[in-house]
Image (tube, rainbow, N blue to C red):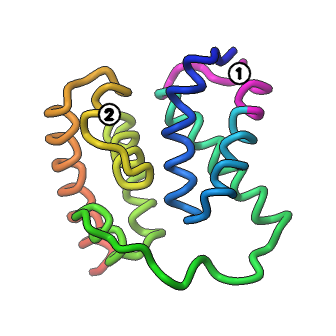
């Protein structure tokens, strides 16, 4: 069962993750609620082999895909792209999203979760460190190393 304090802690991560995918605050909020509904219904399926935020983001992604299947997009996502300032977002924007996500999926659990929280969730290194029970410096260094691995992996796809 997810407690109120856990909901408050994890809902921010899930919401930001969904907002980064949809660029629609209302839809992200709606799918966040559905995510936690589904998580409570299937709490027995959480086996602890990954971080709870990773599990919740996977549920969120599935809820979002289900929503899109039931409600086909009438138009593409917002034609006006947000103003990207961070190196991470710039890197992702320049690369093919599917290949980046495929490469992120190949990373080990901690690095994969960190990359999702930073790139897709837009969280600070301090917040990521808190969520993962590590230091802010650990998050920064691990993110940098993960990004270097991604660049190498992406170069393999280009060949």
Give the image location of residue 46, x and y in percent: 63, 23
Dot 1 alpha-carbon crowd within 10 angstroms: few under 14, some 14 to 19, many 20 or more: few
Q: In which quarter of the image is the N terminus?
A: top right
Is residue 106 among the parts visible in the rendering? Answer: no
Give the tally of numbered discs.
Answer: 2
Is mark 1 in CB contact (under 8 Å) with mark 2? no
The residue depicted at 20 percent of the width and 26 percent of the height is 135
Foreground mark, 1 or 2, reads 2
The residue depicted at 40 percent of the width and 40 percent of the height is 113
The residue depicted at 42 percent of the width and 73 percent of the height is 82
Give the image location of residue 51, x and y in percent: 47, 27
Labelled disc at residue 127: 2
Give the image location of residue 93, x and y in percent: 36, 74
Asked whether, in this view, residue 128 is left or right of residue 21, the answer is left
Task: Give the mark, 1 or 2, whose residue is nearer the N terminus.
Answer: 1
Secondary-structure class at tag 1:
helix
Give the image location of residue 72, x and y in percent: 80, 73
Q: In which quarter of the image is residue 157?
A: bottom left
Asked whether, in this view, residue 7 is left or right of residue 142, the answer is right
Magenta stretch in the rendered image? 37-50
The residue depicted at 35 percent of the width and 74 percent of the height is 83
Q: In which quarter of the image is the C terminus?
A: bottom left
Residue 46 lies, with reference to residue 148, above or below; the image says above
């Amino acid at each position: 069962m997810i407690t109120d304090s856990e909901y408050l802690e994890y809902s921010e991560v899930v919401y930001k993750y969904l907002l980064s995918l949809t660029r629609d605050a209302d839809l992200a909020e709606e799918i966040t609620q559905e995510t936690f509904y589904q998580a409570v219904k299937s709490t027995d399926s959480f086996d602890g082999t990954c971080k709870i935020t990773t599990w919740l983001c996977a549920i969120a992604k599935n809820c979002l895909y289900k929503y899109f299947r039931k409600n086909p997009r009438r138009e593409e996502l917002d034609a006006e792209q947000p103003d990207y300032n961070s190196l991470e977002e710039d890197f992702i924007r320049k690369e093919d999203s599917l290949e980046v996500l495929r490469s992120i999926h190949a990373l080990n659990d901690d690095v994969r979760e960190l990359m999702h929280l930073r790139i897709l969730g837009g969280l600070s290194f301090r917040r990521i460190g808190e969520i993962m029970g590590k230091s802010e410096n650990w998050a920064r260094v691990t993110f940098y190393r993960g990004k270097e691995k991604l660049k190498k992996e992406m170069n393999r796809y280009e060949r």
